[in-house]
Amino acid sequence: MINTRLSCASYLDPAVVIIADAAYIAPMNDANITSASDIPSANWVDRRAPAAARPYLRLARADRPIGTWLLLIPCWWGVALASPGVPDWRLMALFGVGALVMRGAGCTINDLADREYDAKVARTASRPIASGQISVFRGVLFTAILSGIGMAVLLQFNTFAIQLGVASLVLVAVYPFMKRVTYWPQLFLGLAFNWGALMGWAEVKGDLDAPAVWLYAAGIFWTLGYDTIYAHQDKADDLIVGVKSTALKFGEGTPFWLALFYAGTVALLIAAGDAAGLGWPYFVGLVAGALHLVWQVWRVDLNEPGSCLTIFKSNRDFGIILLAGIVTARVLEAGG
């Protein structure tokens, strides 16, 4: 989830705006990041990035790549499912760049919308916009820059995939506000975060077909599971500030719902694989992935934020396991 420009050159060079802003308006510094903050310390941003760029990298969550992985993996699933043999590495790289910048843009939009809530919560009070390190205007400008890069990536795709990409912006814009009106913001996150499954398929095939739709639906159930786990970190603070989540809705009954969501994920992935005509390596990978999901439900301590975060992050492993199964099945199919 901005001050006047410092020079005429800033009007011409957005990078100058960003760097100048970080030096000019930051009332907080790295030392102000408390142990309660969700901003990790001693990561590559702290060690290697210029001080002026750090607030923007933190705003884009460059220091926390798990969100980029979870946005990217459905894109890669869609590409791999639609590709005969090994997926085109250039296409996979394009989706990688797109996921990186659009995740950053989405986080900035979320932080702009939630700045007043974030400032009241210890875990989020040090975030760059909530803390005042980056002003609202600069946050909007940063979003525009990242979105521009994302649009440049999108324009490399075919017309149908471009149209799908533009349609996804509605979900991106709506999601940050859902926690104010419904206990199901995780559903809207799932709708937005897994759109790449449709786009990956569409870029390869030029259309949409049943396997892509099943894959998208599976991703939505997957997100309902992992983001409910993530939301349990914030349940006490969410009650205080008055926002909603599936963690609050399910409460002590969450393990049942996690099992239900993950069972739905596996069932829909079986449907996707069957509709795509995938062979046994895919289903071996799916079994391995399903066991990982079972481990998540069994292992997570929903009353311990550290456990929730660790299990949440492990969903990258699930995504990669499934991707390996898809690619292996397609490669063996092409070779046979």
Image (cartoon, rainbow, N blue to C red):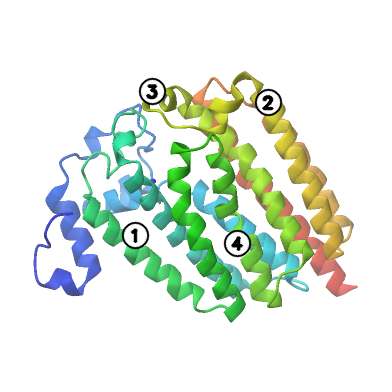
**Quarter of image, res 302:** top right
Element class at badge 1: helix
How far, Cα to Cα, is label 2 from label 3?
A: 24 Å
Which residue in the protein does label 1 denote?
143
Note whether 272 is above or below 13 in the view shown.
Answer: above
**Quarter of image, res 203:** bottom right
Amino acid type, residue under disc 1 in the picture: Thr
Callout in the foreground (1, 3):
3
The disc placed on residue 240 is 3
Percent of width and height locating residue 234: 46, 28
Which residue in the protein does label 2 denote?
255
Amino acid type, residue under disc 4 in the picture: Gly
Determine crowd level at label 4: few under 14, some 14-19, many 20+ residues with C-alpha closer than 10 A.
many
Labels 4 and 3: the sequence-earlier one:
4
Left or right of 11 in this view: 168: right
Amino acid type, residue under disc 2 in the picture: Pro
